[in-house]
Image (spheres, rainbow, N blue to C red):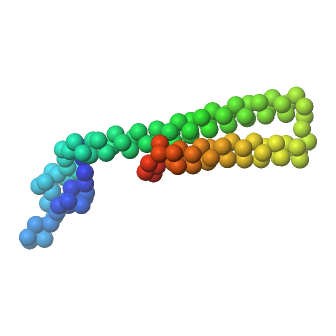
Amino acid sequence: METVCELCNGTGTTKDDNGHTDICPRCLGLGTVKVEESEDQKVEFAKRLKTRRPLVTATYILVIVMLLYYLIFILADFTYHFSLTAFIIILILGHTISVGGYILYVLWISFHGNGENLSV
Protein backbone atom coordinates (compact mmCIF):
# COMPACT_ATOMS: atom_id res chain seq x y z
CA MET A 1 0.00 0.00 0.00
CA GLU A 2 1.26 3.50 -0.75
CA THR A 3 0.85 6.58 1.43
CA VAL A 4 1.89 10.19 1.03
CA CYS A 5 5.51 10.81 2.03
CA GLU A 6 5.63 12.55 5.41
CA LEU A 7 8.97 14.24 4.74
CA CYS A 8 7.93 16.15 1.61
CA ASN A 9 4.11 16.05 2.07
CA GLY A 10 3.67 14.47 -1.35
CA THR A 11 5.50 17.13 -3.36
CA GLY A 12 8.63 15.03 -3.98
CA THR A 13 10.96 17.90 -3.08
CA THR A 14 12.54 19.11 0.16
CA LYS A 15 14.79 22.01 1.12
CA ASP A 16 18.22 21.36 2.55
CA ASP A 17 20.03 23.41 5.22
CA ASN A 18 21.17 25.99 2.65
CA GLY A 19 17.65 26.52 1.29
CA HIS A 20 18.23 24.65 -1.97
CA THR A 21 15.39 22.51 -3.30
CA ASP A 22 16.38 18.84 -3.56
CA ILE A 23 14.65 15.59 -4.40
CA CYS A 24 13.15 14.00 -1.30
CA PRO A 25 15.51 11.27 -0.05
CA ARG A 26 12.69 9.16 1.38
CA CYS A 27 10.37 8.90 -1.65
CA LEU A 28 12.97 9.75 -4.34
CA GLY A 29 10.75 12.47 -5.79
CA LEU A 30 7.66 10.31 -6.23
CA GLY A 31 5.69 11.79 -3.33
CA THR A 32 4.48 8.40 -2.12
CA VAL A 33 6.09 5.74 0.06
CA LYS A 34 5.25 2.03 0.11
CA VAL A 35 4.03 0.89 3.51
CA GLU A 36 3.40 -2.66 4.67
CA GLU A 37 -0.21 -3.34 5.57
CA SER A 38 -0.74 -4.88 8.95
CA GLU A 39 -3.08 -7.83 9.34
CA ASP A 40 -5.51 -5.63 11.29
CA GLN A 41 -5.77 -3.20 8.39
CA LYS A 42 -6.51 -6.04 5.97
CA VAL A 43 -9.23 -7.42 8.24
CA GLU A 44 -10.72 -3.94 8.70
CA PHE A 45 -10.72 -3.37 4.93
CA ALA A 46 -12.46 -6.73 4.35
CA LYS A 47 -15.09 -5.82 6.96
CA ARG A 48 -15.75 -2.45 5.33
CA LEU A 49 -16.08 -4.09 1.94
CA LYS A 50 -18.55 -6.62 3.35
CA THR A 51 -20.72 -3.90 4.89
CA ARG A 52 -20.72 -1.90 1.65
CA ARG A 53 -21.84 -4.83 -0.47
CA PRO A 54 -25.59 -4.49 0.29
CA LEU A 55 -25.47 -0.79 -0.55
CA VAL A 56 -23.71 -1.40 -3.87
CA THR A 57 -26.16 -4.20 -4.70
CA ALA A 58 -29.11 -1.94 -3.90
CA THR A 59 -27.68 0.76 -6.16
CA TYR A 60 -27.29 -1.69 -9.05
CA ILE A 61 -30.85 -2.91 -8.52
CA LEU A 62 -32.11 0.70 -8.51
CA VAL A 63 -30.36 1.42 -11.81
CA ILE A 64 -31.81 -1.73 -13.42
CA VAL A 65 -35.31 -0.98 -12.12
CA MET A 66 -35.12 2.58 -13.44
CA LEU A 67 -33.96 1.39 -16.87
CA LEU A 68 -36.86 -1.08 -17.02
CA TYR A 69 -39.23 1.66 -15.84
CA TYR A 70 -38.08 4.01 -18.62
CA LEU A 71 -38.42 1.25 -21.21
CA ILE A 72 -41.97 0.37 -20.14
CA PHE A 73 -42.90 4.04 -19.74
CA ILE A 74 -41.70 5.00 -23.22
CA LEU A 75 -43.43 1.99 -24.81
CA ALA A 76 -46.67 2.82 -22.97
CA ASP A 77 -46.40 6.45 -24.05
CA PHE A 78 -46.03 5.45 -27.70
CA THR A 79 -48.96 3.06 -27.37
CA TYR A 80 -51.43 5.18 -25.36
CA HIS A 81 -50.22 8.74 -26.16
CA PHE A 82 -50.41 10.20 -22.64
CA SER A 83 -51.33 13.83 -22.19
CA LEU A 84 -48.65 16.12 -20.75
CA THR A 85 -50.26 16.11 -17.30
CA ALA A 86 -50.51 12.32 -17.18
CA PHE A 87 -46.96 12.05 -18.53
CA ILE A 88 -45.56 14.22 -15.72
CA ILE A 89 -47.63 12.54 -13.00
CA ILE A 90 -46.60 9.03 -14.08
CA LEU A 91 -42.96 10.09 -14.39
CA ILE A 92 -42.85 11.67 -10.92
CA LEU A 93 -44.75 8.75 -9.37
CA GLY A 94 -42.35 6.18 -10.82
CA HIS A 95 -39.28 8.05 -9.59
CA THR A 96 -40.79 8.55 -6.15
CA ILE A 97 -41.61 4.86 -5.77
CA SER A 98 -38.21 3.61 -6.96
CA VAL A 99 -36.08 6.07 -4.97
CA GLY A 100 -38.35 5.66 -1.94
CA GLY A 101 -37.89 1.89 -2.13
CA TYR A 102 -34.13 2.37 -2.36
CA ILE A 103 -34.07 4.62 0.71
CA LEU A 104 -36.27 2.20 2.67
CA TYR A 105 -33.95 -0.70 1.77
CA VAL A 106 -30.87 1.24 2.86
CA LEU A 107 -32.57 2.12 6.16
CA TRP A 108 -33.62 -1.50 6.61
CA ILE A 109 -30.11 -2.90 6.13
CA SER A 110 -28.61 -0.24 8.39
CA PHE A 111 -31.04 -1.02 11.24
CA HIS A 112 -30.80 -4.81 10.94
CA GLY A 113 -27.05 -5.10 11.51
CA ASN A 114 -26.05 -5.88 7.93
CA GLY A 115 -24.92 -2.33 7.45
CA GLU A 116 -22.78 -1.58 10.50
CA ASN A 117 -20.68 1.48 9.70
CA LEU A 118 -22.56 1.94 6.44
CA SER A 119 -20.41 4.82 5.29
CA VAL A 120 -19.38 5.11 1.69
Between residue 53 and residue 85, name the one nearer to us: 53
Q: Residue at x 29, y 41 (%)?
A: 43
Between residue 39 and residue 108, name the one nearer to us: 108
Q: Residue at x 59, y 35 (%)?
A: 61
- Is residue 12 among the parts visible in the rendering? no
**Residue 32 shown left or right of residue 60 in the figure:** left
Q: Residue at x 72, y 34 (%)?
A: 69
- Is residue 92 among the parts visible in the rendering? yes
Q: Which residue is outermost to the bottom?
A: 18
Q: Position of residue 119 (x, y in %)?
A: 45, 51
Q: Residue at x 66, y 43 (%)?
A: 101
Q: Position of residue 80 (x, y in %)?
A: 90, 31
* Figure quadrant of residue 81: top right
Using the image, determine if residue 14 lies above or below residue 44: below
Between residue 29 and residue 59, name the one nearer to us: 59
Between residue 103 and residue 21, name the one nearer to us: 103
